[in-house]
Image (cartoon, rainbow, N blue to C red):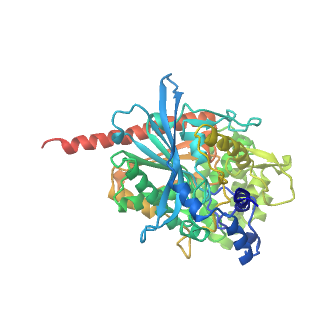
Amino acid sequence: MSRLTLILLGALVLASPLLAQNRQPGQRPDSARTDTARGRSATPSDSAARDSLRPSIRDFLSRVAEPPVVTHRTIRLPNGDALRYTATTGMLPIRNDSNGVIEGAMFFVAYTRDGVADVAKRPLLVAFNGGPGSSSVWLHMGAYGPRRVRLMADGSAPAPPYQVEDNPQTLLDQTDIVFVDPVGTGYSRAARPELGAKFWGLDEDIAAMAEFIRLYLTRYARWSSPLFISGESYGTTRATGLSGYLADRGITLNGILLLSTVIDRAASTMDRDNPLGFANFLPSYAATAWYHHKLAPDLQAKTVEQVTDEAERWAVSEYHPALVMGQRLTGDRRSAIVKQLARYTGLSERFVEDNDLRITLSRFNHELLRGERRVVGRLDSRFTTFDTDPGSDEVQLDPSEATIRNTFTPAWNDYVRRELRYRNDDVYYILGGGIGRWRYPQTQGYSDVSPSLERAFTKNPYLKLYIALGYYDMATPYHAVEYTLSQLRVAPEIRANIVSEYFAAGHMMYIDEASRTKLRAGMRRFIDGAIRQADASSTAVGRPR
């Protein structure tokens, strides 16, 4: 058998998903499972067979050492101006701090605007997605990059084959952008299989991403550029954790942009011993029921903003305290809570009572449209699909996740080869398949990176934070983010640096044309404001006394 055949077979073997079983709220689930996840432990012979089919360490190092591929292109902005840019596609090594040995490599695509007089002063944004286990393709080809996947105006998929088009809402007219894939996603890999564990954990991932940023700033001489980072979903956990980690190491940020955020996992985890998660999900349930016309006529006559505002107040003042009471909640008081919970969720009082006032996401998504034999999406609850198993309590397919995976996967694989001219026959792990079990440092409780953000604000009071929240995002519910922000221990004047913007959209608000336009306008104001503040501060420093 030829060496090329062995490599191709290895790629197929390695394509089996290895997503973390302890999934974060914002993680896009992968329906497949490894043998280990099903309960059968991998045997030594399994590992030996798999490793024998992997490209050798020599092949890996050769790939990392290759010079990046550089291409040039022009797009038109909404005002008609031509935006000429350079795309740089390649790998950066991640070395062991102690001995300098390359233990992994991160794939990146960097876009820089041509014709800039002083590149050193040009703003730079580093962007990534989440999972953990997701590549950066979603922000890259859906929101920020100069080219995007063509979708219908409401974010649904057109008929295949799928196409790529110019993105007039790209951030590239304002800031250069680097899209990076963490190790185990995209084309990014650990140097050897056993080294993967050094990257797959909350702390490990933050350290590796910080090293990528340091090395990129160094190799491309961008240390003096105004610096922004942006994450989506678990990428917001990564970005928030990075904020303090980078500040501790002398890398100071001008701004952080978060889409569909999870900072404190406790705020959106629905466990029986965590009433907070159920209360924080309720406004998203109310928005979803409103969208599908399942609420009472008086609520349906209101706007989604009015409905969710009412649901938020009740969740805080009545629902959460009722859940804390547990079995002490009885009689008329319990009946009143059941009635109101049914009112805001669009579900029957019997269903609410049968679930002991605690309605998990999968049960809600399955129950809301059960009479129509439809299930609603998790990433975007406006999306629905045919219910193949109406007797089940579990949703077998997330229609919103299926839409984006089916469109972005072929579009990206064509784009990276045809337009970026980057050749790599490895599997591009677009969403799952490349990582093992994800580790969190907490032995008890829930992961929480808000202390890192508090530290970043304390060390740099000029830091700005932008957060985009979707009413129909049921992977990272918006009210959980509001709760987390309200708990931040920062100086009162720092809160003016935090901007929250709301969208009648789901987890990926940018796939919707109207929301994408609104998002770009909000980010333009935010980035411009952060840069103006940096310029004003610089001028003040140089002003004679």
- Which sits in the foreground, 51 or 357? 51
In the depicted structure, whether residue 196 falls above or below residue 505: below
Residue 139 in percent (x, y) is at 57, 45
Q: Is residue 192 left or right of residue 215?
A: right
Residue 528 in percent (x, y) is at 39, 37
Residue 447 in percent (x, y) is at 54, 67
- Which sits in the foreground, 292 or 400? 400
Residue 328 in percent (x, y) is at 66, 73
Q: Is residue 303 visible?
A: no
In the depicted structure, whether residue 406 falls above or below residue 243: above
Residue lying farthest to the front in this orientation: 2
Tell me the quarter of the image containing the N terminus.
bottom right
Picture residue at 74% right of the left edge, 73% below the top: 46
- Which sits in the foreground, 75 or 530? 75
Q: Quadrant of residue 361?
A: bottom right
Tell me the quarter of the image containing the C terminus.
top left
Q: Is residue 505 left or right of residue 497?
A: right
Q: Is residue 68 left or right of residue 134?
A: left
